[in-house]
Image (spheres, rainbow, N blue to C red):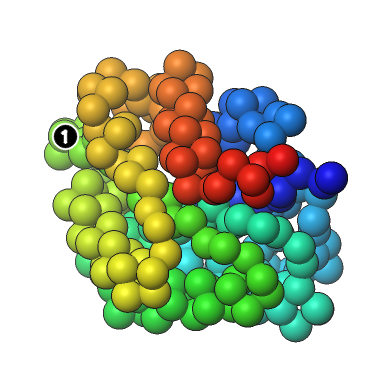
Amino acid sequence: MALPKVFVIGDSISCYYGTHLERMLAGVFAYDRKGGTHKLADLKDGTDGVNGGDSAMVLTYVRELRKRGGFHADWVLLNCGLHDTKTDLAAGVKQVPAAAYERNLREVCGLLRAMGARVVWVRTTPIRDLAPEAIPADLKTCRYNADVVAYNAIADRVMADLGIPSLDLYTFTLNLGPDVYFDKHVHFDETAAAKQAAFIAGGLDALVPRAAQR
């Protein structure tokens, strides 16, 4: 009997924990991700890379999947938010405004469900805010944890409305402490990435009936 398939659509954080997650799910779930074995190689705007990018990029990707006949995944671990919350320091605007973020999430989840996948939302991980004096003068965009909190709240509302379960990777990662960032701001070291993968593997195990794992 074929293993149930888990497909990951997520930002760079998922790329780091993904290698650990694939190992942890071996023999229980078949693992794949955006930019993995399933590619839409002729997309011209970068939306077929392993990094899901912002919600608009994810929506473009999922729309294209649907247009081309869909794909098979029993479960989709979905996240986007880190890129959406980027603030243009000159204009003071977000890469994807809050209202557009909500619309994108709703359409992405609807399309994935229409293709037969069960969606699990993974809450966006925390930012360690840079001190003002540590922000390079030539930096064009910056992320702030307050925006992550706000966009997570939007996603929480959307997923509750749609009856989609969430894995609270935000709180789990926050509780690992402030010294888990290898770049002091956004990305996490390998030890933290492995712990994130274990948290997600455990959450997925709790969500999926044992009979469906055989």
On screen, residue 6 versus residue 125, left or right, reads right
Q: Is residue 122 visible?
A: yes
Amino acid type at circle 1 is: Ala
- Which quadrant of the view contains residue 85? bottom left
- Which quadrant of the view contains residue 52? bottom right
Where residue 120 sits: x, y (%)? 48, 56
Q: Looking at the picture, tell me which residue is in the foreground, 102 or 117.
A: 117
Q: Looking at the picture, tell me which residue is in the foreground, 137 or 66.
A: 66
Which residue appears at 40% of the width and 58% of the height? 165
Where residue 178 sits: x, y (%)? 23, 23
Which residue appears at 75% of the width and 83% of the height? 67
Above or below, comparing residue 198 to residue 4 in the picture: above
Which residue appears at 71% of the width and 48% of the height? 4
Q: Quadrant of the N terminus?
A: top right
Other-residue count near label 1 (Cα within 10 Å), few / some / many at <14 / 14–19 / ≥20 = few
Where residue 54 sits: x, y (%)? 48, 62
Q: Quadrant of the C terminus?
A: top right
Q: Is residue 151 visible?
A: no
Where residue 77 sits: x, y (%)? 54, 52
